[in-house]
Amino acid sequence: MGTRNTIKLTEAEWADIYNKIARRYMSTPSVLLIREKMKSTLGFVSRRHREYDEQTGYTYSIHLDFYSEEAMTMFRLTYL
């Protein structure tokens, strides 16, 4: 598998990107529903991460784990 690279997003940022991906892959919704399909098509998988902060309580973020530098670069150029 090699070293994974991760992009950390807020839930709002991910919601916007998720909707863009959903529109782009409207004819194949399995890209966002099946992790292996997401990995093979987009080059990453998503995971929800929870952190605890004593002042604010729990905060949530979305981590995108990329499996290649090329996929990460294409994602940045396309969605960020």
Image (cartoon, helix red, strand yellow):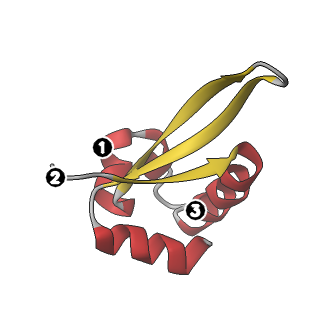
Residue 77 is left or right of residue 6, and the answer is: right
Q: Residue at x 84, y 25 (%)?
A: 56
**Which numbered dot is residue 72?**
none
Q: Badge 1 is on which residue?
A: 36
Snapshot quadrant of residue 16: bottom right
Q: Residue furthest front?
A: 54
Q: CA distance from mark 2 to mark 1?
A: 17 Å
Q: Badge 2 is on which residue?
A: 2
Please identify the quadrant where the C terminus is shown.
bottom right
Q: Amino acid at mark 3?
A: Ile
Q: Residue at x 16, y 52 (%)?
A: 2
Q: Badge 3 is on which residue?
A: 21
Q: Amino acid at mark 1?
A: Glu
Query: Which is more N-terminal, label 1 or label 2?
Result: 2
Q: CA distance from mark 3 to mark 2?
A: 25 Å
- The kind of secondary structure element at disc 3 is helix
Residue 39: % across, % down = 32, 51
Residue 13: % across, % down = 72, 55
Q: Do callouts 3 and 1 mark residues in contact (Cβ within 8 Å)?
A: no
- The kind of secondary structure element at disc 1 is helix
The image shows residue 2, relative to residue 77, as above or below, that is above
Query: Which is more N-terminal, label 1 or label 3?
Result: 3
The image shows residue 76, relative to residue 37, as above or below, that is below
Q: Do callouts 2 and 1 mark residues in contact (Cβ within 8 Å)?
A: no
